Each structure stands twice: as C-alpha cells, then as structure tokens.
C-alpha cells in the first residue's frame, strides 16, 4: 500500500508541473485506463480478506479521488490559460474612431418657438397660424390702422401689387383678425410666425419672427395681461425674479397700450436678464381696441381682452447670447452647428425648457 | 422730439430733479430715448498716452508713435513734435475730428508712406494757447487714469429726446409735454400772460380759401409785420435752436421754428413784398411746379393743397414754403401764416412728393385747430421784440368751424378694463389737468375733449388717459388662468413638429432662409407655379417669393462649399408660395445632402451620397411622423428639376394627384447651370399639406397584437426580369400570393451584365413564410414556392433563374 502512496505522490508532483492538456490526459489513462495503475490496484483487492479489503479499498478510493480531482483542476487551469492567451491576441485598439456621427440640429428660432408654445400651452393657449401673404385689410385696416394713418409709416411694407392690396404681413396681428372672424369668443391663442419689413441693416432683417397673443373673454383685464406676461417672461428666461416694467405706449389696435421692459445688467461682458438698473424693451401689448373687435364681429360691450406681440428672434438672442440677428438667416453651417439644438431636446415643462 | 429741461421749465413750475422728470416722462408714455448733452465737435478729443516711439523709416524728423487711446486699443500716429516721447500723456484727435484752429477735418492718411490714424495735438491747435512747438503735455497726477476719456468737458445743457407715438401730436411741443407732466403731479403748468400786444392797421393782403372738391385747408390766419430788421438770433434763441439739433438761420425763421417746437404750432413767414397781390389757398393742377426751401424743384399733381398768389405756387400748405417768397436778411415786411391743414391731405401730398418736414410731421398727426391766433401772437411778439416792426390786426379766414368732441364716460369702464379702482374725484382731477372739461350727469361724466387731442374719440381713450397718468404700476399682476379652450396644437402643427425634429435627427442642420429669393434661380424650380414678384424688393436678387425652398438651400449650399465644407446636410421647413393671394402657400420641408458618406474612414469604404440615403431619410421621417410604411407607394414621376432617371415620388394612395414627398438627384443641367461643385448632391422634399390626416389617432388605430410561434422558413428566389420592371411590383406580386403566409419579402441582390441578357436584370429575393396555425411541412412549402414562381412568371414576364 505504501508503494501506491509513493506512486500517487510521484504523479501529484508530475501533474503540478505539467502544462499540456494532452500529457495530462496521458497521465489520466496511465492511472485509470483499462490497465491503469489504479485500476489494477482495485482488481487486486479480491485477493485480500474481508477485513483487509475494507481498509485497503477505502485508502485506494481516497487516492483515486485525490488524483482525479487534481487532474480535472489541472485541465481546467490549462484551458483557462489557453483561452486567455487567445483573447489577448485578439485585442484591438478601441480608441480608433467610431463610424461618423451625423448630428443634426434644430435652428434657434424653431427652438425658441417651441419653448414659447410650451410655456403658453401650460396656461391654456392654443397655437394658430395665418398666411405670410396678407391683404391690406387684415394687416392694417381691420387693426384700426386705416390708410393715411401715420402708424403705417412705422411698417416698411413689402407689396405684391401696385395697388398695395397684397403684401407680406408686417406683423403677426392679422392672425388675430382671421382667428376672431372664423370663430366665436372666447379666444385664447398664440400665433408664432414669419413677418416682413423692407428694412435691412445690422439690427434689422427683412424677415423676422413674431409671436402674437390674444385672450378675449368676458372679464379679461389689464391685470390678466400683466400676469400672463410676467409668467411668460419668468418661465422663458428660467429665473425666479424678474424686474419688469409696463410703460404706456401706442398701437392703433390696442387701447390702452403698453410696452414691456425687463431689467438687465452687463456682467463680464455678458447680458444678465432679471436684475440690474438698465431696461430693455422686449414686447408691445394692450387691450384689444373696441374698433378691432367691431371689425371682427365681436361685441365690445360683451367681450374684451388683451393682445401682445413679441419679437422671437430677439428673445432668442437674449436668452442664448447671440449677438448678430443677420446670422440667423445666413445659413453658415458652422453657425447652425454651434447655436443649433439637439432634435431630442424638445422643450417641455416636466423636463425643463432648456438644458 | 428734443428739448432741454430749461425749456420745459418755461412751461412747468416743478420741484422735480432731472432724473425724476425723466422717469415721469417714461411712466406716462412719453418714452425717453436719450438724455445727453448735445454732441459737440470737441467730444472727439481724448486723453492718450504715447507708449512707444521710433523714427519714421522715410523721414528723420517724423516719429512713428504707438498711442494708447484707452479701451485696450493702441493705434499708430505719425507725429513731428520734438517732445513726442514714450510715456507722454497728451491729447489725441481721431480721424473725423475737426481741428479747432484751422477747422480741418482729419482723415486716415499716409504720411511719407506710413499710415497715420488721426493726430496728436498741440495747445495752439486746440486754441488753448499760442504754444505750437510741441504736443500738449498733460500732468501725470491728473490724467494718468483718464486715458480714453474726453479731454474737453461738454458743458452744453443736456437734451431730452422723446420718442412720441403718432397719437400724441400735442406732445410735439414743449407745452404739451409740460401739461402731461403737470397732470401726473410733476409740477404746475405755467399759463402764458395775456398778451398786451398793440396792433396797427389791417392785414391788407387779401387771403381766400377756394372752394375745392377736396380743400386741404380749413382755416388760414395771418398778420402783417411791417418794417422789421431781420438779423442773427440772440444767444438764448440760438441755444434753443441748437438744442433741437438744428442750425440757426435768421431771427425770423428761428422764431417760427421756436414757436413750432414750443407750442406745437407750425407757422410760415413770407416776405410780404414778394407776394403778387393776394394769397389764394387752392388745389394744385398737374404740371404746376415750384422751388421749395429745400432747394428742390417739385412738379405737382392735381389736388395738392397749395398757397399761391397771382403768379403761381408759393408753397405747399403745411409742408414746405417756396424760395420765391422766402425771408432773407434784407426782408422788411413779413406775412406770418398760421393755418390748419387736414392730416389726410398733408399725408397724401407728402407721400406723393416724398417730402418730410417738421411741419408736415405735425400737421399729419393733427395740430390744435384752435391755436391759430395764439401762434400768431406769440411769434409776432418775439419778432417785434427782436426785429422790431409793426403788427397788423390778425386776419383769420375759415371755411369750417371746429367741432368739439364730447364723450359720455361711465367711470366703471375704467375698472372693468384695468382691473383696479380709482376714486371719481381723482379721476376727474386727472382729466381736468389734461384739459378736459368735465361735467357730471348722475354716474356718467360728460367730457369735452381738448382741441389739441385729435386722438381721443371714445370712452376707451379716456380709460387710457387715466391709467397712463395714474401709472401702470397700479395695475395688479393677476395669476394666469390656466383654462384651456382647445388642444395646443392641431394635427398639422403636430406633424410640423414631428417632421422637423425627425429630419434633424437624421443628421440634417435646420436653417431658416428668406421667404423671397432670386427669380433667376427660382425659375429653375418653379415648375408650373406663377412667379410672384415683390413690387419693392430689398434687392434685385431677392425679388420674388420663393415657389420652392430649394433656390435658397442651393444658394447657401454653394456658400458653404466655398467655405471649404464638403459634407453638408441641410433642411428648412417653411412656406413655399404657389400664388400671390393669401393662403396660396404650402408648408414644405426641403432637404439636401452633399458630399460623401464615410469620408476618410479607417474601416469603411467611403462613397458618394446617393438617392437611397435620402430615400431612407424621407421614408423613416414619414414613418416616425406616424405614416404606416405599408401604405407608402413609390413612383418615378417627379418634378423637372430632378434627375429623370434617379428620382422618385412618395404617395399614400394609388392615383393620388400630389405626391407627399419626392427624393432623388437634382437634374444635371441645373447643377451645371448653377455651377455647383460638389462630389454628390441628393435632395428630398415633403409637402405637409399633402399628407392625409388619418381618421384615427395612432393609439386608436393599432391592430390587435398577434404573433405566431410556429416555425418560420426562408426561401431565396432569383428572377430574370425586364430591366424597367419595378422591384416594388415584384415584391407586391409575391406578397399577394398568400398574404397570410408570406410575412416578409426582401430584395437582397440586383444584378445586370454578365450572363444576363441585354435589357434584363436579375433580382434576388428572400421570402419569409410562416403559418399562424401549424408548422408547415416540406409539401406545404413546395406548394408555396411553386405558386410564387408561377405567379411572378405569369404576372411579370420574369423567368426563375435556375
């Protein structure tokens, strides 16, 4: 028996240093094959007495387990090593560039329109639209700006015919007229869109964007106007406090009329909205003139309400630090890429207006 | 409207300081544009420091100085002064400045071949002393931290510049502004002393206002002033005229201007000796002409209101006087005119002749018709005081009496409109201070509107007056009411948003371009649409409304290619115009891709963008916007600006008139004509208006969820078929063999050439077959295969490739 133990120790040593799966398998058959050393030892057991056999068999089983165990561990060990070696060889440079990413962008004007729509949607406004080409009546006359009214001089109008009947709308206010003519009060709408004036220099573009607002009901007063705009400006600039000033002004289609200024200051060369002692004019508004209501078949003794008009491009410039209005419309690929917004960045209330 | 605080104080007794006045003006709707000293020519001269000098390369006596002029700016000045040295603080005059000594205007100039930006000054050049030998040397302790600041202190009185809205002609005169301020509690309006002017004799130049179809003048007041000595205005008057930003001319002209700005009462002074017999106010005839005081000759049309004498036109009433009867220093006798002209007449005439004057600006907005005498008296007094002379009785001819406006005002309208309440007593006080005559009839106020307020015609105007003077800060800020009347966006507005962001997510940059374009490019894309010219375009290359967005997109594509950008994906969503009437427009997405895919990639083969890139973008975008891919039909009929063989149209239904989208290459002729230099260019467009609104929302139109767990089989087929046979047809034929069993048909190879007969092509398809009821056995599959082959062969003329 002690011989077997010696043989076992010899094989254990051999297995410890072996690194080849085939050789380990050879050892396995040397030990456990048909005429293997261990197999033969078991065969010999029959010649011993019952007492002896019991003891020997138990010893032999232990030896067998130990060796088999060792062999299977060894095979696993070698295989793992080989796999690792193979994987090591397959290693690639993962810092090589990925396939081209094609990043599209949404134009700042579109993004700002969506922001504005989102804010007004929260307080129940719906979006209306009107055509870019308007007739003289909707753009001026219906809005209490008859021909020969000096206020017409403030709008440098593009005309499509010599009788000045057809024109490119100079503001989004004709959408008020269209909306009220085709429906019945109450009205609660905003109307963003393109507007045109034949004026072109560093701060004026022949085309720009406005959003019109209109809320007509039985008891809508100037307090509601102030509240609505106060809410809008705070939401839009995403600040808690805003210094806002309502100042009397004049538009033919509203009475009383107001212009709204917001406070700002220049900090480190950047404009900061909300604080400061400087004022920036950002919109015009007022109570819809009874003459306008009459023109669109709404009874001014029953219904009243407010309207406002905001320059979209300018709001975008202020919020996103864009200095040059003309650049909005010049399609410089680099500019669009720089100031554009990710298409997944849809302004919403719950996710936040801007990122 | 410009004026000084001093001038205002002629009309307003106030304890307010300048800043309080400025704030008050803005708060009552008279917007202050600026409050600054009038610009002085001396403002240009600034403190500067020489930081480096070296000898002029071409002249030993001259020096080349680097000069620090503040705001981090350093400029180069050539200078001959011996004392120009490093560190010297002196006075710098930039180009454009006028040197006080010789009144020379500086410009950027080359001195012996070196450019000098402005100059450094000596004391004598600035008229400070006779010292002309060297530059003025400023003391370090006083000026070291003033580099860039003005050297001369501007001592002129500060001028308030108001932007007056068109409804407030009364505030185009200082007194009107004072009246508004007094109503708002900023002081007391000073009433003019009763004039004790003595009149001698009658105004003996006959004045007649002719009866006309449309007479633009309703009242013509005048007086004669005899024996005047016209001269330069006294200093106080010159200062006033200067503060308006105007140049003094002569006492008589300056006085009429002064009264205009003081009382908003335009006047005109004629040299009475140059008037031929009489004054006739009449309508002009076409072809009449006269030379106006702006030294331009005007040819008149019919029906313009003119002031004339027996010899012809003297001036355009209320707009501009003529040279023939103008006053000069030698003028001895004056006819002074104070009249009322109708705004409409003034506006029509000045528009036709393109004249803008201070008088025109005022008459157009509406002058106080009851200020005729007051204007004559005030001006006559000043003329007598400054130029001497005797004043005749006032002569006022009228063809119409002024009717006062009366408004019955219910004070409740104020609260209803503004949302806050004001005591009746306070409300009445405001109105009275503004010049209204107020009487009470129970709850209603009877208001007589002052003659200088033509803008006030109805009750709502009264509300504005009260709230404006009371102050908008009294209006409450009510919480917004969140009630919603209807959904924020309608179907097409939602589609707009989806498609806009969907296209952008395919790698396109959104742009916004003008709605107008160059007719020369537009005509390549306009198809059968009418051209829509703009009567008064901003420039000749933006002269028509765009019939398509592509003219602009391609114009800017070229600009970006010129910038060296090679791979470009651009799109715009916006209007394309189909006619000149309101509503003749479609909402369209136009997009383009230029350049290559996988340019300079280390692992993929680079290739030029092709039609199937844009086909994918357009189909995917439509699907994302909610259109079912199975409903999409592709056709090859496209507009003429597309490559006739490499373009397609997308339809939702067979036999539909308008495609909802097109995609493909641009016609090579257009590429050539527009000289577009890019490796590849493909485009697509989607017309949102042609997308049919689905009857149901997507959430309601989803079919029942069904799937099959039985084994599916795939079979490949290759057909030889006519070259022009559309693969879409082939796929449809195969699907129609058994719509239930055939789940998917994929085209995986198209081949022409070797071993394929001329005019034919080989198409290979992979067909997925799966039953929802059982596992198909070989027999079932064989039957289907045979059906597929026979159907395709009989319906398309194809042959199975063996």
Image (tube, coloured by chain):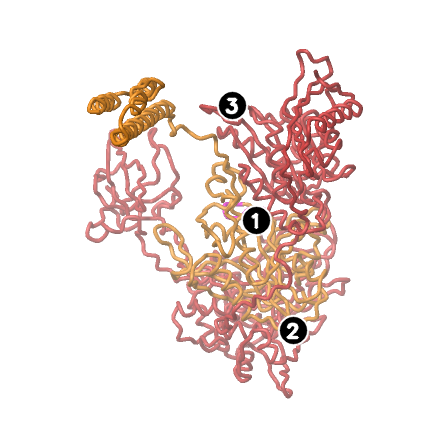
Chain colours: A orange, B red
Res A263 quadrant in image: bottom left
Q: Residues within 10 Å of mark 1 (few under 14, many from 20)?
A: many
The mark tally for this picture is 3
Residue B606 shows which numbered tag?
3
Whether residue A312 is visible: yes
- Residue carrying label 2: B458
Quadrant of image for the C terminus of chain B:
top right
Q: In the image, what residue occupies the spot 42% across and 68% down?
A: B6
Q: Which residue is mark 1?
A: A208
Q: x, y percentage for residue B484?
A: 61, 64
**Which of A299/B728 is in front?**
B728
Q: Label 3: how many residues lie within 10 Å, few (<14), some (14-19) or many (20+)?
A: few
Q: Is residue A12 above or below residue B585?
A: above
Q: Are labels 2 and 3 assigned to the same chain?
A: yes
- Give the secondary structure at mark 3: loop
Q: Secondary structure at mark 2?
A: loop
| Percent position of residue B771, x then y | 68, 35
Q: Which image quadrant for residue B653?
A: top right
The Cα–Cα distance between marks 3 and 1, rounded to whole angstroms, is 40 Å
Local packing at callout 2 (Cα closer than 10 Å; few below 14, some 14-19, many 20+) is some
Q: Is residue B294 above or below residue B762?
A: below
* Lateral position of residue B648 relative to residue B382, left or right: right
Q: CA distance from mark 2 to mark 3?
A: 73 Å
Q: Identify which residue, A319 or A270, lies in the foreground.
A: A319
Q: Nearer the viewer, mark 2 or mark 1?
A: 1
Give residue A240's position: percent from left, percent from top: 42, 62
Query: Which stretch is magenta?
Result: A201-207
């Amino acid at each position: 028996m002690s011989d077997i133990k010696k043989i076992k120790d010899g094989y254990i040593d051999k297995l410890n240093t072996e690194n080849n799966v085939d050789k380990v398998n050879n050892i396995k058959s040397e030990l456990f094959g048909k005429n293997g050393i261990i197999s033969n030892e078991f065969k010999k057991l029959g010649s011993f007495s019952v007492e002896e056999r019991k003891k020997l068999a138990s010893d032999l089983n232990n030896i067998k387990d130990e060796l088999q165990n060792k062999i299977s561990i060894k095979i696993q060990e070698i295989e793992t090593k080989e796999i690792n070696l193979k994987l090591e060889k397959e290693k690639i440079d993962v810092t090589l560039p990925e396939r081209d990413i094609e990043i599209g962008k949404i134009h700042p004007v579109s993004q700002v329109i969506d922001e504005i729509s989102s804010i007004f949607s929260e307080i129940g406004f719906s979006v209306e639209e009107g055509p870019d080409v308007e007739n003289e009546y909707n753009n001026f006359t219906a809005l209490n700006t008859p021909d020969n009214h000096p206020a017409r001089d403030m709008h440098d109008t593009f005309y499509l015919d010599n009788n000045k009947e057809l024109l490119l709308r100079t503001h989004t206010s004709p959408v008020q007229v269209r909306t009220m003519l085709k429906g019945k009060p109450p009205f609660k709408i905003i109307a963003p869109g393109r507007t045109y004036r034949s004026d072109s220099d560093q701060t004026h573009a022949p085309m720009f964007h406005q959003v019109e607002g209109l809320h007509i009901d039985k008891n809508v007063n100037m307090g509601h106007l102030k509240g609505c705009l106060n809410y809008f400006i705070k939401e839009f600039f995403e600040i808690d406090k805003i210094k806002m000033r309502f100042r009397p002004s004049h538009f033919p289609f509203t009475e009383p009329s107001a212009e709204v200024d917001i406070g700002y200051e220049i900090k480190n060369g950047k404009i900061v909205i909300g604080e400061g002692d400087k004022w920036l004019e950002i919109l015009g508004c007022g109570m819809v003139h009874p003459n306008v209501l009459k023109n669109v078949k709404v009874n001014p003794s029953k219904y009243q309400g407010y309207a406002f008009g905001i320059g979209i491009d300018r709001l975008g410039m202020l919020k996103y630090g864009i200095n040059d209005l003309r650049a909005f419309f010049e399609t410089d690929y680099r500019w669009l890429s720089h100031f554009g917004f990710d298409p997944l960045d849809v302004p919403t209330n719950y996710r936040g207006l801007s990122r | 409207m410009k004026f000084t605080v001093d001038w205002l104080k002629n009309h307003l007794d106030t304890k307010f300081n300048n800043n309080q006045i400025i704030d008050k003006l803005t708060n009552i709707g008279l917007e202050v544009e600026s409050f600054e000293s009038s610009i002085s020519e001396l403002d240009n001269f600034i403190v500067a420091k020489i930081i480096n000098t070296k000898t002029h390369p071409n002249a030993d006596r001259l020096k080349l100085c680097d000069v620090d002029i503040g705001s981090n700016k350093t400029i180069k000045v050539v200078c001959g002064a011996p004392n120009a040295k490093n560190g010297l603080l002196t006075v710098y005059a930039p180009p454009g400045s006028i040197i006080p000594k010789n009144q020379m205007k500086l410009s950027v100039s080359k001195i012996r071949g070196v450019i000098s930006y402005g100059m450094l000054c000596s004391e004598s050049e600035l008229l400070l002393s006779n010292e002309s030998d060297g530059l003025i040397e400023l003391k370090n302790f006083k000026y070291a931290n003033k580099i860039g600041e003005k050297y001369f202190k501007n001592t002129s009185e500060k001028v308030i510049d108001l932007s007056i809205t068109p409804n407030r002609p009364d505030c185009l005169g200082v007194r009107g502004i004072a009246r508004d301020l007094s109503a708002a509690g900023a002081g007391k309006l000073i009433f003019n002393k009763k004039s004790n002017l003595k009149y001698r004799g009658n105004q003996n130049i006959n004045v007649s206002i002719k009866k006309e179809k449309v007479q633009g003048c309703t009242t013509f007041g005048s007086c004669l002033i005899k024996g005047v000595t016209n001269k330069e205005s006294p200093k106080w008057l010159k200062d006033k005229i200067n503060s308006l930003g105007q140049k003094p001319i002569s006492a008589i002209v300056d006085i009429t201007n002064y009264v205009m700005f003081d009382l908003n009462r335009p006047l005109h002074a004629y040299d009475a000796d140059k008037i031929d017999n009489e004054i006739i106010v009449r309508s002009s005839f076409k072809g009449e002409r006269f030379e106006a005081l702006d030294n331009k000759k005007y040819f008149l049309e019919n029906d313009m209101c003119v002031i004339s004498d027996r010899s012809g036109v003297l001036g355009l009433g209320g707009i501009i006087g003529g040279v023939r009867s103008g006053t000069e220093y030698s003028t001895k006798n004056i006819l002074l005119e104070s009249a009322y002209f109708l705004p409409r007449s003034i506006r029509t005439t000045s528009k036709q002749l393109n004249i803008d004057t201070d008088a025109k600006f005022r008459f157009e907005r509406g002058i106080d018709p009851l200020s005729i005498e007051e204007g004559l008296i005030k001006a006559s007094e000043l003329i007598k005081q400054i130029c001497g002379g005797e004043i005749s009785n006032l002569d006022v001819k009228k063809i119409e009496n002024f009717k006062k406006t009366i408004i019955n005002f219910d004070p409740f309208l104020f609260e209803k409109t503004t949302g806050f309440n004001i005591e009746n007593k306070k409300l009445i006080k405001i109105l009275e201070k503004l010049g209204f005559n107020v009487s009470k009839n129970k709850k209603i106020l009877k208001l007589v509107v002052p003659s200088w307020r033509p803008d006030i015609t109805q009750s709502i105007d009264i509300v504005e007056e009260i709230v404006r003077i009371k102050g908008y800060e009294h209006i409450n800020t009510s919480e917004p009411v969140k009630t919603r009347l209807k959904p924020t966006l309608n179907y097409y507005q939602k589609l707009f948003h989806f498609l806009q962001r969907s296209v952008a997510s395919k790698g396109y940059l959104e742009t916004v371009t003008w709605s107008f374009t160059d007719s020369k490019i537009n005509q390549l894309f306009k198809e059968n649409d009418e051209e829509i010219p703009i009567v008064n375009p901003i420039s000749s290359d933006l002269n028509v409304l765009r019939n398509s967005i592509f003219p602009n997109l391609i114009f800017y594509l070229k600009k970006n290619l010129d910038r060296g950008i090679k791979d470009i994906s651009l799109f715009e969503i916006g209007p394309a115009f189909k006619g000149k009437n309101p509503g003749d427009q479609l909402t369209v997405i136009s997009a383009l891709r230029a350049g290559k895919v996988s340019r300079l990639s280390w692992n993929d083969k680079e290739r030029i963008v092709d039609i199937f890139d844009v086909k994918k973008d357009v189909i995917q975008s439509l699907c994302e916007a909610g259109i079912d891919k199975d409903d999409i039909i592709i056709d090859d009929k496209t507009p003429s600006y597309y490559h006739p063989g490499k373009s397609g149209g997308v339809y939702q239904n067979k036999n539909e008139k308008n495609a909802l989208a097109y995609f493909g290459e641009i016609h090579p002729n257009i590429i050539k004509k527009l000289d577009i230099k890019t490796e590849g260019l493909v485009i697509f467009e989607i017309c949102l208006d042609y997308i049919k609104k689905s009857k149901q929302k997507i959430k309601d139109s989803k079919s029942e969820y069904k799937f099959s767990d039985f084994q599916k089989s795939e079979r490949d087929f290759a057909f030889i078929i006519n070259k022009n046979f559309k693969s879409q047809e082939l796929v449809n034929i195969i699907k129609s063999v058994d719509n239930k069993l055939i789940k998917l048909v994929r085209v995986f190879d198209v081949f022409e050439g070797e071993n394929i007969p001329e005019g034919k092509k080989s198409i290979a398809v992979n067909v997925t077959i799966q039953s929802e009821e059982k596992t198909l056995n070989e027999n079932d599959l064989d039957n289907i295969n045979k059906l597929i082959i026979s159907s395709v062969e009989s319906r398309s003329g194809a042959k199975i490739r063996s």
